[in-house]
């Protein structure tokens, strides 16, 4: 694979061919990792590298997913999760803080409440003599590119025997205005032929105009509605999300909505296509009833596992180890 991604900042960087290649690499890594010898091989590929996980916004699953992805490749990790323990408390700018870290590490993975912070750091490092790759692990209300990659990987695996993602109908439900996972995935789905997206939310939480403009530009079909039950039987995948009310304070407003109308209950399973799937980036609140978990169409736990493999693939690709891994796969007759 030609190395197309150095910094991973937003989904606009990925085209269809890249998505195919990275998902294929993740599948191979999954196979390789099934044996002890395979795991040892993977852990030898980047064991001379060190990563800084700069996660100054709450996170456990994405943090641990990246942490285990690095471990699988042998990368040693350090972490900063609370800026109060660093010199920022002495008045240092965050840009200076992260630039300092970049001098100790070979990769920076960051989650940050500011929309453009990862991009700012990537640009800043590009102009230094030690530019290390930056991966955006979630930036404000804006983007979450690696979540979108794992969501694409999950959709691709789910529709493997149904002609792939092309022509599928996908519904997004919940807080679409502030949910960065929805924004990133909706943008990335424009890479697939004839998909149709449904945005199901109360008007206050509908998807942003910037994403709709992108869909118009790419000629991706969509529908905007608040009628969840009507949409369920029509679609191949339903992407549930929680209310992102941690932003209420900053926005100075709280809108009371009937969350029940935008949640997947046990009775909805009957409405869903027999081969439809239910996704969720997690953490979940009450948007999906726990009784739904045991239905084979519930894909959200598989999604978590897929996230680890796609992140291993992404990091391996950034460090141009993709070809070597594919060679290992072939030479071991996997
Ligand atoms: C999401 C996030 O942080 O944007 N979580 C995740 O990364 N899996 C979704 C959320 O917090 O609702």
Image (cartoon, rainbow, N blue to C red):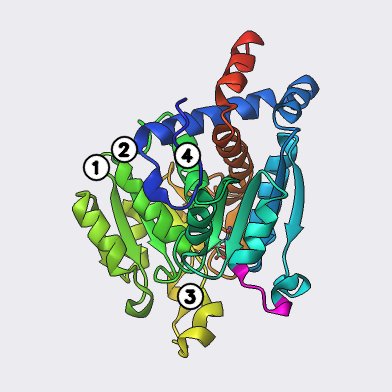
Instruction: Classify mark 2: helix, strand or loop.
Output: loop
Rendered residue at 60%/38% (across/down)? 315
Give how far apart the Cα atoms at labels 1 and 2 are.
6 Å
Kindly report which numbered mark, 3 or 4, lies closer to the viewer in this rendering: 4
In the foreground, 236 or 213: 213
Residue 189 at x, y = what percent?
A: 35, 47
Is tag 4's residue or tag 1's residue first in the polypeptide sequence?
A: 4
216 displayed left or right of 295: left
Give yes or no for residue 93 being in the magenta stretch: yes
The residues bearing labels 1 and 3 have C-alpha atoms spaced at a distance of: 31 Å
Q: Residue at x 54, y 60 (%)?
A: 138
Q: Which residue is mark 3?
A: 260
Decide which of 317, 168 is in the foreground and name it.
Answer: 317
Residue 282, magenta (yes or no): no
Q: Disc 2 or 3, which lies upstream in sequence?
A: 2
Q: According to the image, label 4 marks what residue? A: 5
Residue corresponding to mark 2: 166
Residue displayed at 45% across by 56% down:
239
Q: Earlier in the sequence, mark 3 or mark 4?
A: 4
Q: Position of residue 135 (x, y in %)?
A: 56, 50
């Amino acid at each position: 694979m030609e190395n197309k991604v150095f910094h991973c900042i937003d989904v606009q960087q990925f085209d269809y061919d890249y998505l195919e290649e990275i998902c294929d690499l993740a599948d191979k890594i999954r196979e390789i990792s099934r044996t002890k010898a395979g795991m040892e091989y993977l852990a030898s590929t980047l064991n001379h590298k060190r990563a800084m996980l700069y996660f100054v916004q709450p996170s456990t699953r994405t943090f641990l997913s990246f942490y285990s992805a690095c471990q699988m490749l042998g990368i040693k990790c350090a972490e900063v999760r609370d800026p109060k323990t660093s010199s920022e408390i002495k008045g240092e700018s965050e840009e200076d803080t992260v630039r300092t870290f970049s001098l100790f590490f070979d990769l920076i993975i960051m989650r940050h409440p500011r929309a453009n912070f990862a991009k700012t750091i990537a640009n800043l490092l590009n102009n230094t003599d030690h530019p290390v790759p930056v991966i955006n692990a979630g930036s404000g209300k804006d983007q979450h590119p690696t979540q979108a990659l794992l969501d694409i990987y999950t959709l691709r695996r789910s529709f493997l025997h149904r002609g792939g993602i092309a022509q599928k109908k996908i519904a997004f439900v919940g807080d679409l205005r502030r949910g960065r996972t929805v924004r990133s995935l909706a943008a990335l789905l424009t890479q697939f032929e004839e998909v149709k997206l449904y945005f199901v939310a109360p008007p206050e939480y509908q998807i942003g105009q910037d994403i709709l403009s992108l869909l118009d530009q790419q000629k991706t079909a969509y529908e905007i509605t608040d009628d969840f039950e009507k949409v369920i039987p029509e679609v191949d995948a339903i992407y549930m999300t929680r209310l992102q009310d941690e932003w209420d304070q900053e926005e100075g407003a709280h809108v009371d909505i009937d969350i029940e109308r935008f949640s997947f209950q046990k009775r909805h399973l009957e409405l869903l296509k027999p081969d439809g799937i239910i996704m969720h980036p997690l953490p979940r609140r009450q948007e999906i009833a726990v009784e739904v978990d045991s239905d084979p169409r519930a894909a959200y736990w598989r999604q978590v596992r897929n996230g680890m493999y796609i992140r291993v693939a992404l990091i391996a690709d950034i460090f141009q180890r993709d070809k070597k891994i594919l060679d290992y796969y072939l030479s071991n007759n996997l």
